Structure formats: structure tokens, C-alpha cells
Image (cartoon, rainbow, N blue to C red):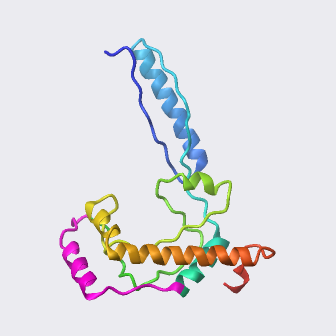
Amino acid sequence: MPATAEALYYVRHPKPEVVREIWKRLEKAAAGAAMASETSVSTELISGAYGTLPNMTLGRIADMYLREVGGFSYTPDEASYAARLSETLPSGGRVGKGGPVLIEPFVEGVKISDSSDLGDVSWVSPTVQIGTAIWVAGTPPHSWQAVTASGSSIGMKGAIMAAKTLALTAADLFRNPAKPGGSAGRV
């Protein structure tokens, strides 16, 4: 048995109170293991990972500009690339809802469950998240297909679409500082 050991646990849950409860259980488990092995344990809480607290006002504004920017179409080369890449997707991958032209409806109150420090930030500062088509429909996250599509012209088109949407959203908020939420009244 080594003289010392270290472990890192990443606790996440959409509700902050559940994160705190799980952390307490982890500390108890560590204390129990230390007692059973006649060793000692110390813990350090470095940071948290709360779920994202959605800001519906910012979400409606960003959605308005996402629709204004609109989706994009594949060139013939991109369509060929997307078809070839689709053939490599694992059968367990996410089912795609459409292509890059489709802009899905804005849904009030939806919390993004992805692991990110943005979740922590959103509890102390208004934030907004949007999604654009940088992958071929059906691509699972954390896959080589996601990486290659992100670095392709398809990924670049989706990134530009996102940048335009966020820039228009920010410009609106700067132009209309007296109104809570910028142009939220128009949405």
C-alpha cells in the first residue's frame, strides 16, 4: 500500500442542494474507508458543478437573433462529406432531429445538463447558451466524428452562425441598457 494516495471526484447534478448532499456522502464514504483501513483522510472542496440556471429573458433575445441569422445549407462537397461521416456513426449515437437549416423552437425553462463551469457562473450572473449545427446529425458527443466535423467547413459555418447570434444579442443589450433584458419586449 502506498504511503499516500489522492483521488479527484467530480460531483454534478442540476440542483445545487443535491450536489451538497452528494458531497457530504462522499466525505462519509472516505472517512469510512479510512477507518476500515486504519489510515487517515482529508478532503478539500475545490469547486462545484451546478446545473445551468436558465435566463429566459436572455434566451428569448438570443433565440430571436438565432432565427434572424438563420440556418445554413451544405455545399455539394459538404453534403458528400456529411453522408460519408454519417456512415461511420455508431448505432447508439444520438438521433439527429434535422440538418443545419432547421432551427428548433425555443423552450422555456429547459436546463442544459452539460458539465461546465458555466453552470456555476449562471447562479451569480445572467448567462445564455445557444446551440448551432457544427456536427452531422446523429453525431455523439466526445467522438472522433464530432472532432472532425467541428474542424470542417460545416463546423466553421455553425461557429459563425453562433458568433453572429451572440454578437447581435450583446449589441442589443448594449443599445437598450435601460430596458431590463434589452429588446425582450419585442420577443
The reply to whether residue 110 is in sight is yes
Which residue appears at 35% of the width and 82% of the height? 99
Whether residue 43 is situated above or below residue 82 in the rendered picture: above
Quarter residue 79 falls in: bottom left
**Which residue sits at x=46%, y=25%?**
30
Which residue is rendered at x = 62% and y = 76% of the image? Answer: 169
- Horizontal and vertical percent for residue 162? 49, 74
Q: Residue furthest top?
A: 38
| The residue stretch that appears in magenta | 69-92
Closer to us: 26 or 46 = 46
Instruction: Report if residue 71 lies within the magenta region.
Output: yes
Q: Is residue 160 above or below residue 13?
A: below
Against 100, residue 15 (above or below) is: above
**Residue occupying the point 42% across, 75% down:** 158
Position of 107 with respect to 95 (left or right) is right
Residue 7 in the figure: left or right of residue 47: left
How many discs mark residues in the rendered view?
A: 0
Whether residue 96 is visible to the viewer of this picture, yes or no, is: no
Image quarter hosting the N terminus: top left
Query: Where residue 167 appears, x then y in whole percent?
Result: 59, 75
Residue 35 falls in which quadrant of the image?
A: top left
Image quarter in which the C terminus is found: bottom right
Position of residue 116 relative to residue 161, above or below, is: above
Say whether residue 149 is left or right of residue 181: left
In the image, residue 178 lies at what x, y percent? 81, 75
Any magenta on residue 83? yes
- How far from the left and from the top, in percent, is residue 177? 77, 73
Residue 149 lies left or right of residue 164; in this view the side is: left
